[in-house]
Image: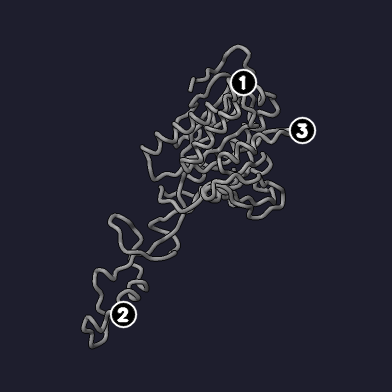
Amino acid sequence: PPTGSAGTAGDRPAAAPGEPFRTRALTVPGLGEGAAGRRSRARTPRGRTTGSRRPREGSGGGLHLAATVRAAAPHQRARGRSGPGLIVRRDDLRQAVREGRESNLVLFVVDASGSMAARSRMGAVKGAVLSLLLDAYQRRDKVGLVTMRRTGAEVALPPTSSVDAAAARLRSLPTGGRTPLAAGLSTAREVLRVERLRDPSRRPLLVAVTDGRATGGPEPVERAHRAARLLAADGIASVVVDCETGPVRLGLAGALARELGGPAVTLDDLRAETVTALVRGVRGDRTPRARDTAAGTAGGRTAGRGPVRETTRGRAA
């Protein structure tokens, strides 16, 4: 997709981010095997024991004694055991399976178009993204930033472990122009494709921050939805931060979330103090489900390929 340029005539000055806050933790569904961290569930060399398996070369976990004994016990007579002790063979050995937490790649796709350009509104959006960046730092994630505005999308920051760099790019981000939503999602998909080749064990989480208003070119909404469906087909866990405000709401961000197979949450939903507990799907049934973000819902429905989880274990930003 074409690259957007900063500082073009007609842009609004960069709005200062709002005050950061403690966020809820958004996690990738399923069980990964990535680098140690504090976000999503993963098989790790250390952690609580959840089961056993036959040993695999190069994998940690240590010996699961009880499972090894259970595997060897039925064969003692056939092996000629006549006294105390247990005859254990190599095939009886079982390795402990342990579960801990992994770090992820959190890729932000931020709408910086004219529909988001009201300074008070963009300040709140930047404050929310900054809060999520601080949460990512505490959870040892990598982060990346894609921005969309005017005629295209820009990789403002390739995936990095430097949250400071991401925060600096976010603070200086101007707004203005149309909403090339399809370009933003397509650029994000390409970034994730390249990163998957570099670091295949690190699972991604796409966070799209937008009001869902796609403009520019023919059929902009349908093109955006097609790009979203491609991301969903890749199995990318996604969440849409719905920035639409005002008494009349079009629900466009919710429609985008359904195409991505993930939840749509409001800025208020991100706050750890909010009572709402959200569990949304991104990996199972691909049938679109109705958006469910009502306050007071505990452990919501799943849609897509499995649950993106939002828990109350966010740390102070």
Identify the amino acid type marked 2: Pro
| Mark earlier in primary sequence (3, 1) | 1
The residue at 60%/36% (across/down) is 256
Direction from residue 81 to residue 38 in the image, left or right: right
The residue at 71%/52% (across/down) is 296
Q: Position of residue 131 (x, y in %)?
A: 60, 39
Identify the amino acid type marked 3: Val
Q: CA distance from mark 2 to mark 1?
A: 70 Å
Residue located farthest toward the left when viewing the structure as drawn: 80
Q: Which image quarter is the C terminus in?
A: top right
Q: CA distance from mark 3 to mark 1?
A: 21 Å
Q: Which residue is mark 3?
A: 248
Can residue 91 be seen in this snapshot? yes
| Mark earlier in primary sequence (2, 1) | 2
Q: Evaluate if marks 3 and 1 touch, with contact meaning CB atoms under 8 Å apart.
A: no
Figure check: 98 above or below 213: below
Q: Position of residue 90 (x, y in %)?
A: 24, 69
Q: Which residue is mark 1?
A: 178
Q: Which residue is mark 2?
A: 74
- Label 2 sits on a secondary structure element that is helix
Figure check: 57 above or below 202: below
